[in-house]
Image: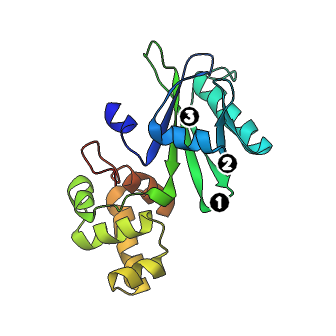
Amino acid sequence: MDAVLGNNRIGVVQFDRRGRIVAASDAALVHLRDGGTLRDDGAVLRAVGRAEDDRLQGLIAGALGTSGAGASGGSMGLRRPDAAVPLVLHVAPIAGARRVAALALVVDASRQARIDPGTLTEGLGLTPAEAEVAALVAEGLTPRQAGAASGRGEGTVRWHLHRIFAKLGIKGQAQLVRLVSAFAWSPGGSDD
């Protein structure tokens, strides 16, 4: 947890069992203080837009298990007035902790780290070419853009994607992005 709290790309907000903020990392405080998207309203995390705040409160209640069902996590995007790329919030329950019942990860995609294809080769068993394509697609490039960035044709990129999906047992680019994004940051990695 210390490594996550020290990462300046991912903000972390911790909640107690009543949904009140008990701690926030420096990266999360940047967003809470600027008030453009998120704010701290008396130890309650709020989104600036009404519809977004309703959704956020629902995610927090779900993670705390107060919504009538068992505790479950969820994600949402938050529009930012000053940036084209939204903030992404992932809210999740924390089992077994005494003080912290749930947490929210605030991901600023505009500050996302470059994904190292070598890590994907080792961690997922992809060939170097597959790993490069997977990294480019996970960073948000279309197959055409990934082809241009890697010196491959769009058809070749799509062929690599088909092989990656089969190799990893996944069905599409969204699943690939989620899987590869898990490798984008590591506790020992650089924060810049």
For the residues bearing labels 3 and 1, Cβ distance under 8 angstroms: no
Q: Is residue 147 above or below residue 46?
A: below
Label 3 vs label 2, nearer the camera = 2
Image mark for residue 36: 2
Front one among 162 and 136: 136
Q: Disc 3 versus disc 2: distance between alpha carbons?
A: 24 Å
User: Mark 1: which secondary structure?
Assistant: loop
In this view, 104 is above or below 145: above
Marks 1/2 in contact by CB < 8 Å: the verdict is yes
Name the residue: 65% across, 55% down: 80
Q: Amino acid at mark 2?
A: Gly
Residue 62 in the figure: left or right of residue 170 = right
**Residue carrying label 3:** 73
Q: Earlier in the sequence, mark 3 or mark 2?
A: 2
Find disc 1 in the rendering and name its residue: 82
> Which residue is at the front of the view, 49 or 101?
49
Give the image location of residue 19, x and y in percent.
Answer: 62, 22
The residue positioned 69% from the left and 24% from the top of the image is 67
- Image coordinates for residue 126, horizontal then vertical, percent: 25, 63
Label 1 Cα crowd, 10 Å radius (few <14 / some 14-19 / many 20+):
few
For mark 3, does the 10 Å Cα neighbourhood hold few (<14), some (14 to 19), or many (20 or more) residues? some
Q: Amino acid at mark 1?
A: Asp
**Disc 2 element:** loop
Q: Tag 2 or tag 1, which sits nearer the N-term?
A: 2
> Residue 45: which numbered mark, if any?
none
Residues under numbered marks 3 and 2 in contact, where contact means CB atoms less than 8 Å apart: no
Coordinates of residue 41 in the picture (x, y in percent): 69, 29
| 89 displayed left or right of 55 | left
First in sequence, mark 3 or 1: give its number: 3
Q: Residue at x 47, y 72 (%)?
A: 141
